Amino acid sequence: MKLDLNSIKQAQENIREVVRKTPLFYSNTFSKESGYNIYLKCENKQKTGAFKLRGAYNKISNLSQEEKVRGVIASSAGNHAQGVAYAATALGIKSTIVMPETAPQAKVQATKSYGAKIIQYGEVYDECYSKALEIQRELGATFIHPFNDEDIIAGQGTIGLEILEDLSETDAIIVPIGGGGLISGVALAAKSIKPSIKIIGVQSSIIASSKVSLQEGKIVTLPGVKSLADGISVKTPGDITFDYMKNYVDDIVTVSEDEIAYGIFCLLERSKLVVEGAGAVAISAILSDKISIKGKNIACLISGGNIDIAVVSKIIDRQLIILKRRIRFIVEIQDRVGQLGRLVNSVVSMGANVVKIRQDTNWNDKGLDYANVLFEIEVETREHAENVIDTLRKKGYNLEIVG
């Protein structure tokens, strides 16, 4: 290992004119729920929507003039692609990014808008990584690795400097972890300034390669699985990052896919932050009671906000149903004029919002004089939902909750 605090301070100088110093703000809501003082470090507010620009800019700025002339190349389906493209263009360097054919077009277009040449190849990261190395040999370009590079690590470590600049009393930093570049830099920076600080990584339980590697004391490759936290779905941590993690990371905990989805939902609803899966795992770990430290002040690193809006919509719908704040039920009514109107008025009068309603007039077992009405409603709380259902039943409605 050759990085030290001065390396990260130099990286901070290298990126100062381009990279934003992102906000660290206190969350009253999450603090009350957890019993800690929770602060959110919002890298979703960074240029390109994620922390990756820090490492990419530091790496590319440190290239020799000859390397800059030959350009850079990277393989990525998301945040690293955008970070490299933005950094290269800002420094007047040509960039080529190889992205999977399955990459969301929004991310492809965003990367292209930052000035990169895009080549789409293969269905998964490993295929486009191999293609990028092939093209690198043809072009002589410098390959920019997403995490296993000390210039990248130093750039990401500037986040640790910023957290302690804003809150020197920080007792722990909770960091998303995939290949280990982010947590290696943050841990090195923070522990060099404050050795007592705890650095805890959070990884998806379905692809916890860094956690397993640290447990076994050697680099372990796990089967490739795509988590909702796709930004940290890494099969194998880097050999460079592994050394830093062994020396500076105190613990790694895991969160389930449901816990990640709940973290995304809570950050959106309670803190008004749009956050991707990897960016939500630190809060997911807090909300699922995976973190236990002696101190009080915890900084949760929100690593990025580049999430497909369609995925956000699915998460909202699913969480509302899980939390019983969106419920579906079928009510039997007599098929007469005014009956449906009275039922709707009863539901609305209790403060429920009718999202969907459908009347089936010919499918009631009692015959054509009766109809089944499917309701989908939104309510404020689970207790509110129970009150609506109980009140309708007390009014004599035959009601069945569905799905």
Image (cartoon, rainbow, N blue to C red):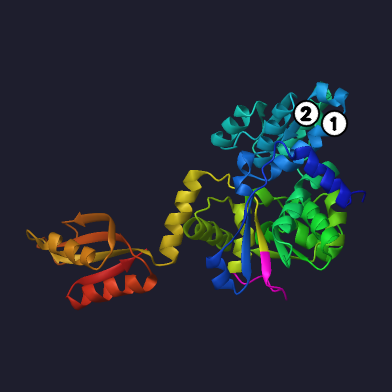
According to the picture, the residue beneath numbered tag 2 turns out to be 72
Magenta stretch: includes residue 289: yes
Q: How many marks?
A: 2
Q: Main secondary structure of the magenta part?
A: loop
Q: Residue at x 45, y 58 (%)?
A: 318
Magenta stretch: includes residue 272: no
Q: Quadrant of residue 144?
A: top right
Crowd rating for badge 2 (residues with CA inside 10 Å; few <14, some 14–19, many 20+): many
Q: Is residue 58 left or right of residue 387?
A: right
Q: Position of residue 279 (x, y in %)?
A: 62, 53
Q: Is residue 2 above or below residue 166?
A: above
Q: Residue at x 58, y 47 (%)?
A: 305
Q: Is residue 304 visible?
A: no
Evaluate if marks 1 and 2 touch, with contact meaning CB atoms under 8 Å apart.
yes
Judge by depth and name the residue closer to the eye, 12 or 57.
12
Please state the extent of the stretch shown in magenta in the rendering: 288-298
According to the picture, the residue beneath numbered tag 1 turns out to be 63
Q: Extreme left residue here?
A: 337
Q: Position of residue 285 (x, y in %)?
A: 63, 65
Q: Extreme right residue here?
A: 2
In terms of secondary structure, where does tag 1 sit? loop
Judge by depth and name the residue closer to the eye, 21 or 285.
21
| Residue type of the residue flagged with mark 2 | Val
Q: Which label's residue is closer to the chain start, 1 or 2?
A: 1
Q: Is residue 394 left or right of residue 39?
A: left
